[in-house]
Amino acid sequence: MAQKKPLILVTNDDGITAPGIRALISVMNEIGDVFVVAPDSPQSGMGHAITVNNTIYCDPITIDKNAPQKEFSCSGTPADCVKMASREVMPRKPDLCVSGINHGSNSAINVIYSGTMSAAVEAGIEGIPAIGFSLLDYGMNADFEPSKKFVRTIVENVLKNGLPKGLVLNVNIPRLPEKEIKGVKICRQANAHWVEKFDKRINPMGREYYWLSGTFVNEDKGEDTDEWALSQGYVSIVPTQFDLTAHHFIQQLNNWPLHD
């Protein structure tokens, strides 16, 4: 008797036509039955935003005529896409959600702003094992071929071993030829941040406007972080949870005179 294939949801934040998601779909088609529900336009930096004040459209679309996946273009955010997929589009809750492959890093503090990772986190909230994949190349002509081997290996391990409830994987892949990637490192999130500034300009009508820019600063010298692993040519995997409770501070907070 043939083994039943896993049902896999593929989504992203760069949009349904982005090269990264097309690469991810091609790998997932080798592993399971694939549904794609992804934004109809780029949604980078949306974080965990959801649509509450507007309607959402989710339309069937055919991009790869000879490919087996079922695809839907969604007007909502990455988190909306996961909600829509699991509640309206798919025949049952998927066995796995993969998000990406993102064009650019989602290591360190970037995970907070990432639509790619927020889609994975939304899946995790709904009890679906989930992985966010990112390649350290922001170009739309990025080469995703070296990523495919690692994507497949990580996905197969998650399907075999599962993930604890409330936990998703944040996977970042260095921009290197496959033969130059040294392997995989399990890491913690680096203590790094953006030093941001606004570039103020004046439009032809005399109105001020701003462009956000900044410099990424890594103050973490540890050799167990995602930033260190990526700088050394490794794929980084950070187990990530959506419980933001600072458990270590609860006892100290209980000692404050808040109950008088």
Image (cartoon, grey):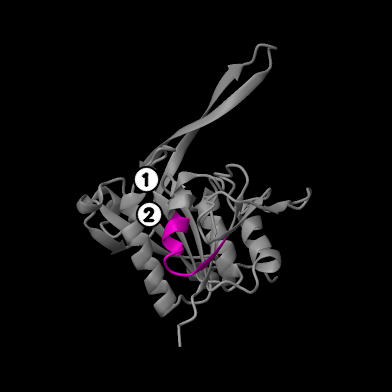
Q: Residues within 10 Å of mark 2 (few under 14, many from 20)?
A: many
Where is residue 7 drawn, in percent x and y? Answer: 54, 71
Residue type pointed to by label 1: Leu
**What is the secondary structure assignment of the residue under circle 1?**
loop
Where is residue 21 drawn, in percent x and y? Answer: 48, 51
Q: Which residue is mark 2?
A: 172
Residue type pointed to by label 2: Asn
Q: Is residue 23 left or right of residue 166?
A: left
Q: Quadrant of the N terminus?
A: bottom left
Q: Quadrant of the C terminus?
A: bottom right
Q: Residue at x 45, y 40 (%)?
A: 194
Q: Is residue 167 left or right of residue 191?
A: right
Q: Are discs 1 and 2 less than 8 Å apart at CB? A: yes
Q: Which residue is mark 1?
A: 136
Q: Is residue 226 left or right of residue 101?
A: left
Task: Specify whether residue 202 is painted magenta.
Answer: no
For residue 217, above or below residue 77: above
Between 104 and 17, the one lying in front of the other is 17
